[in-house]
Image: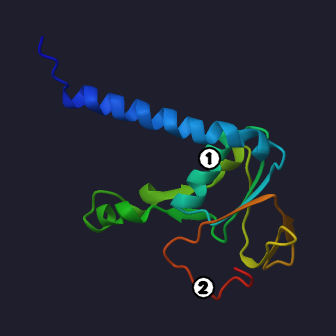
Amino acid sequence: MDHKLSRRDFSKLLLAGTASSALGMIAPSLPAFAASNRVVIIGGGFGGATATKYLRKLDPSLSITLVEPKTVFHTCPVSNWVITGLKTIPDITQSYTALKNRYRVNVITDSAVAINPSAGTVKLKSGKTLHYDRLIVSPGIDFRWDAIQGF
């Protein structure tokens, strides 16, 4: 009997194996993560916004705060479409409304100026201090190493 495995079947098996491995890594850490529910994410680009969305989906009980100095995000990978006339700037502009309303994320329009990992705090340019149990720093491609004291 000839058992050939198609590319599609191979892909399904690979995806199933990867998913089960990932679930195995995530599941044991969920109880430990649930005990510390304040998450601060610095940076609302692709990385920060995506982390925000999927953390909420993973654990609805988390208190998630996203710190981003801009009120909108321009999706740079499709900016070439603007240059060619296929899209306009408003077409590639995203707001943080869905993260606020649909995913119940506290979005703060401000900049982080200092991180104190020992105290679990982030100081903002406005003077406000945020407390966190978990911190994600997603600076994007314009990362300046000396811009955030303590990083």
From the viewer's perspective, is residue 117 above or below residue 77?
Answer: below
The N terminus is located in which quarter? top left
Q: Secondary structure at mark 2?
A: loop
Neighbours of disc 2 within 10 Å: few (<14), some (14-19), many (20+)? few
The C terminus is located in which quarter? bottom right
Label located before the other in sequence (1 or 2): 1
| Image-quadrant location for residue 110 | bottom right
Q: Is residue 94 found left or right of 87 in the rendered image?
A: right
Q: Secondary structure at mark 1?
A: helix
Residue underneath mark 2: 145
Q: Report the disc number at residue 150.
A: none
Neighbours of disc 1 within 10 Å: few (<14), some (14-19), many (20+)? some
Please tell me which residue is depicted at 73% across the width and 49% down the height of the picture: 105
Q: Is residue 5 found left or right of 42 in the rendered image?
A: left
Q: Is residue 50 found left or right of 113 in the rendered image?
A: left
Amino acid type indicated by mark 2: Trp
Between 47 and 105, which is closer to the camera in this rendering? Answer: 47
Amino acid type indicated by mark 1: Lys
Q: Is residue 102 visible?
A: no
* Residue at far left of view: 2
Residue underneath mark 1: 53
| Image-quadrant location for residue 92 | bottom left
Give how far across and how far down residue 113 sits, in percent: 75, 81
Give how far across and how far down residue 94 sits, in percent: 53, 56
Q: Is residue 19 found left or right of 64 in the rendered image?
A: left
Please tell me which residue is depicted at 26% across the width and 25% down the height of the picture: 9
Name the front one of labels 1 and 2: 2
C-alpha separation, residue under disc 1 versus residue under disc 2? 26 Å
* Residue at far top of view: 1
